[in-house]
Image (cartoon, rainbow, N blue to C red):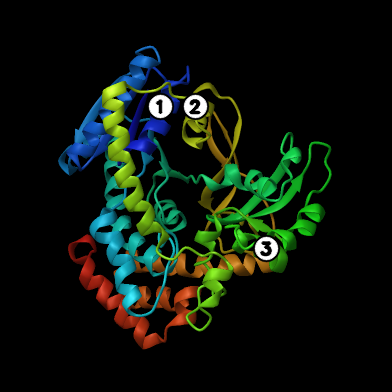
């Protein structure tokens, strides 16, 4: 079996996913093909993964492929392809996504999923993923493409609608959603044996049901504790708790993410909301700098003292591969096309996040039905932006970029149309060759 990892210079993530495979009997004797365009980071990943491979019994083989000219060989014959690229990286592209909007008075927290940051990230990533799909169609047409790159719904949605490649989008937030909620509300005693149902869109999928091991609905007790949580000025998860209070349900991704997915919390006319809800403006920039610095220290320590034992993580990737290889059923929360109206009150062309059964014949999305109307309405404010961004990437029409930004809840609530168009033009110019030509 062969697993190709695109963006293997994302060393920490590559270590988790491939390390997980090396700890799994059904997967450990595979060819692990590492691909990146940065030779230094690729070598760092190879060094660490080679050490993990030896620590876990020396099974399998690691191959490295650097540069676009070697990508097709990296993909040739792959059974599974994991995507974790970041086109343009922190410097210059992420910095540009934050600094230019800031000149127009538009503040962001993460900027990788929605908003103007998410739009621009999608527009520079979709052409690269389209190239991946063309290569895969030629050299590994039956491979399953596991996408971890954000903006998840835009990128996975593009792949699912405009390429023949079998694709599922994967996020970390589904696995930890109900656990984080119960721990925040001091209900950790309810964790064991709990059952939940999560569906919606990536980063805004709704915890529709949560029951304890005896089948008792936990939402009444959850709702009774929300006000006490929100009254604490120190806590960080206030936006999602506010969702429970005003929309009736908790959602998957963190409050710093969700603060910029709507028009409610980051408002120049109400600057006091930033403090009230502990919203970390420019958070992603800070994280990037932190991770760059800490990784270099960690890598130097690894070179000196060796790699610690790898323990299988809760990432879906290795469990999906294992389920397919040994035909053992496993359930995930996957990002798939809403084909057949899996969620009946969202558009069929939307990329939705729903429970999926994985077995020897692949990934099988499950029917959910209608979301509560207010949850579907919140999702649609994001889906509008996702669909228009994909439309812009496909047609190369600049007007669709403008429209995506205009209809983004946060951007549209802060800036007028002329200002939005000027900001988009500035971003397109600043990103230069990282973007195709728009007309």
Q: For the N terminus, which image quadrant?
A: top left
Q: Are marks 1 and 2 in contact (CB under 8 Å)?
A: yes
Q: Secondary structure at mark 1?
A: helix
Q: Residue 19: which numbered mark, if any?
A: 1
Q: Earlier in the sequence, mark 3 or mark 1?
A: 1
Q: Quadrant of residue 74?
A: top left
Q: CA distance from mark 3 to mark 1?
A: 39 Å
Nearer-the-camera pick, 180 or 306: 306
Write the residue at 41% across / 53% down: 150
Q: Nearer the viewer, mark 3 or mark 2?
A: 3
Q: Quadrant of residue 228?
A: bottom right
- Report how far apart the C-alphas of labels 3 and 2 lie in the structure: 35 Å
Which comes sooner in the sequence, label 3 or label 2? 3
Residue 230, disc:
3
Q: Is residue 106 visible?
A: yes
Q: Position of residue 272 (x, y in %)?
A: 54, 76
Quarter of the image that includes the C terminus: bottom left
Residue 311 pos. (x, y %): 48, 25
Q: Residues within 10 Å of mark 3 (few under 14, many from 20)?
A: some
Which one is nearer the viewer's eye here, 248 or 282? 282
The x, y position of residue 320, in whole percent, is: 51, 33
Which residue was labeled with disc 2? 312
Secondary element at tag 3: helix
Residue at point 21%, 72% (across, down): 429
**Is residue 223 toward the left or the right of residue 50 in the image?**
right
The answer to whether the residue labelled 3 contacts the one labelled 1, judged by CB atoms less than 8 Å apart, is no
Q: Is residue 349 visible?
A: no
User: Which comes sooner in the sequence, label 1 or label 2?
Assistant: 1
Q: Nearer the viewer, mark 3 or mark 1?
A: 3
Q: Residue at x 47, y 63 (%)?
A: 280
């Amino acid at each position: 079996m062969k697993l190709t990892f695109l963006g293997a210079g994302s060393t920490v993530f590559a270590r988790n996913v491939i390390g997980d495979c090396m700890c799994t009997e059904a997967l450990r004797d595979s060819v692990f093909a590492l691909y990146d365009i940065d030779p230094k980071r690729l070598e760092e990943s190879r060094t660490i993964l080679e050490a993990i491979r030896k620590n876990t019994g020396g099974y399998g083989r690691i191959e490295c492929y650097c540069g676009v000219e070697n990508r097709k060989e990296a993909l040739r014959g792959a059974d599974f392809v994991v995507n974790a690229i970041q086109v343009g990286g922190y410097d210059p592209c992420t910095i540009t996504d934050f600094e230019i909007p800031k000149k127009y008075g538009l503040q962001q927290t993460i900027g990788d999923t929605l908003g103007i940051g998410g739009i621009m990230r999608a527009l520079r990533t979709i052409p690269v993923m389209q190239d991946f799909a063309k290569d895969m169609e030629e050299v590994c047409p039956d491979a399953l493409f596991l996408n971890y790159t954000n903006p998840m719904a835009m990128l996975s949605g593009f792949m699912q609608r405009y390429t023949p490649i079998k694709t599922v989008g994967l996020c970390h937030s589904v696995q930890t959603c109900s656990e984080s909620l119960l721990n925040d509300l001091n209900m950790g005693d309810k964790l064991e044996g709990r059952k939940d149902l999560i569906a919606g869109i990536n980063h805004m999928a709704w915890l529709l049901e949560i029951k304890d091991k005896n089948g008792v609905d936990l939402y009444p007790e959850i709702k009774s504790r929300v006000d006490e949580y929100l009254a604490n000025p120190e806590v960080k998860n206030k936006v999602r708790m506010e969702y429970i209070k005003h929309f009736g349900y908790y959602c998957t991704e963190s409050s710093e993410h969700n603060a910029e997915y709507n028009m409610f919390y980051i408002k120049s006319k109400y600057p006091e909301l930033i403090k009230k809800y502990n919203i970390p403006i420019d958070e992603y920039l800070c994280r990037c700098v932190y991770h760059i610095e800490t990784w270099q220290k960690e890598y130097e320590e690894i070179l000196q003292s060796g790699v610690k034992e790898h323990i299988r993580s809760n990432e879906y990737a290795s469990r999906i591969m294992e389920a397919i290889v040994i035909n053992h059923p496993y359930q995930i929360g996957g990002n798939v096309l809403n084909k057949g109206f899996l969620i009946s009150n969202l558009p069929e062309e939307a990329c939705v996040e729903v429970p999926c059964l994985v077995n020897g014949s692949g990934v099988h999305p499950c029917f959910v039905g209608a979301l509560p109307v207010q949850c579907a309405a919140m999702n649609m404010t994001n889906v509008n932006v996702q669909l228009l961004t994909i439309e812009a990437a496909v047609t190369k029409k600049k007007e669709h970029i403008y429209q995506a930004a205009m209809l983004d809840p946060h951007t549209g609530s802060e800036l007028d149309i002329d200002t939005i168009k000027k900001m988009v033009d500035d971003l397109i110019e600043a990103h230069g060759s990282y973007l195709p030509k728009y007309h």
